[in-house]
Image (cartoon, rainbow, N blue to C red):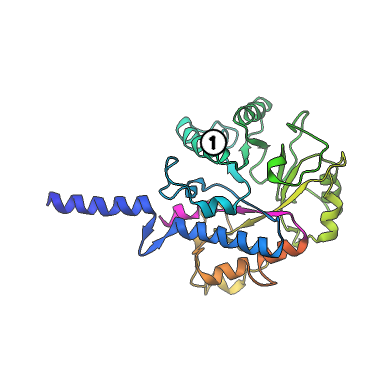
Amino acid sequence: MKFIKKCVIGIFSLIFISGTIYGIDYREEMRQFVISLSRYAESTCPGFLLIPQNGQEILTMDGETEGPVHRDYLKAIDAIGREDLFFGYRRDNRKTPSGENRHLLEWCRLYKEKGIPVLVTDYCSDEDKMDESRRLNGENGFISFTAPERELNEIPPGPDLLSGENRGDILSAGEVRNFLYLINGEKFSTKKDFLSTVKATNYDLIIMDLFLSDEALNEGDLEQIRKKQNGGRRLLICYMSIGEAEDYRFYWKKDWEFSPPAWLKEENPNWEGNYKVRYWDPDWQSIIFGNPEAYLDRILAAGFDGVYLDIIDAFEYFE
């Protein structure tokens, strides 16, 4: 009986470590998805940047910071994004618990060690906490953004919020000293208002959405904000979720609510309108890239400098 119990525990331990169950290695599937996106974008637009957010553990083969690095994945990415490193992990405007902070910090430092810029978004609104976030990120060599609201719908107020402000042209992720994460345009009355407000900033890199009030931005729109107010060129990076489907996106079909495709899973209880997906499914991936109507292809056509991939940590849900 003890032998059987040990065998069962051993099997589940192997599943947990490798991320494989029912013949699917969920971490490797996400790696290969990201790698495919990178290779496709690079073949279409050389120099196009790819920045995954969260899910840092897939950098290594065994999910441990001391483990062997997945070289193709490392080669595929130009920077990484990390939310809640110092503030916001369990609740906005609250310090991330020490255990979670140590774990995330270890991974972020590994990426930095490998030459990958780290973009950290902390969710805090008190001035002293925003200052502390910027200080801690600066001490670690990370690029900091403090978001007053998780909806990412405003430019943070107050003085001296741009650390490392500069007039130079930003042509690569390694030259970025600050960034703005603004993917929700609900507080802007018109597209003109949005563009003029963004144009008046000096952020080196802006993470934004392809759409503003259901209207896709185009090359002409992006050219209006391509330069910082001080004259230097900046990078415009487009947000795209690849680990969940969103029912407010152009690709969503109304009948999916009653007759969902095989790759569509249940709704995320924490984000209304967001649905888990079997991200390794070819039908889902064809929505994301590989044809003129696909999400990434639209981003490329609009003239963005890169893409910011969200829900990379979807593998955790399936594991």
**Residue shown at 63% from the left, 70% from the top:** 290
**Residue shown at 37% from the left, 53% from the top:** 18
Residue 249 at least partly seen: no
Nearest the viewer among 205 and 112 is: 112
Return the residue at label 1. 109
Nearest the viewer among 5 and 264 is: 5
**Residue shown at 81% from the left, 43% from the top:** 169
Magenta stretch contains residue 161: no
Q: Is residue 231 above or below residue 259?
A: above
Instruction: State the image coordinates of residue 140 (x, y, percent, origin top left).
Output: 59, 30
Q: Left of 245 or right of it: where is 184?
A: right
Nearest the viewer among 115 and 319 is: 115
In the displayed orientation, state which residue is furthest to the top: 128
Q: How many marks?
A: 1
Q: Is residue 290 above or below residue 225?
A: below
Instruction: State the image coordinates of residue 84 (x, y, percent, origin top left).
Output: 57, 38
Residue 198 figure quarter = top right
Residue 6 at least partly seen: yes
Instruction: State the image coordinates of residue 291 (x, y, percent, origin top left).
Output: 66, 72
Q: Left of 3 or right of it: where is 25?
A: right
Part of the protein shown in magenta: 303-319
Instruction: State the image coordinates of residue 194 (x, y, percent, origin top left).
Output: 82, 50
- Near mark 1 (Cα within 10 A), the count class, few <14, some 14-19 or many ≥20, is some
Q: Left of 205 or right of it: where is 124?
A: left
Question: What amino acid type should be assigned to the residue bearing mark 1?
Answer: Arg
- Location of the C terminus by quadrant is bottom left
Q: Secondary structure at mark 1?
A: helix
Q: Is residue 111 above or below residue 183?
A: above
Q: Left of 261 or right of it: where is 148?
A: right
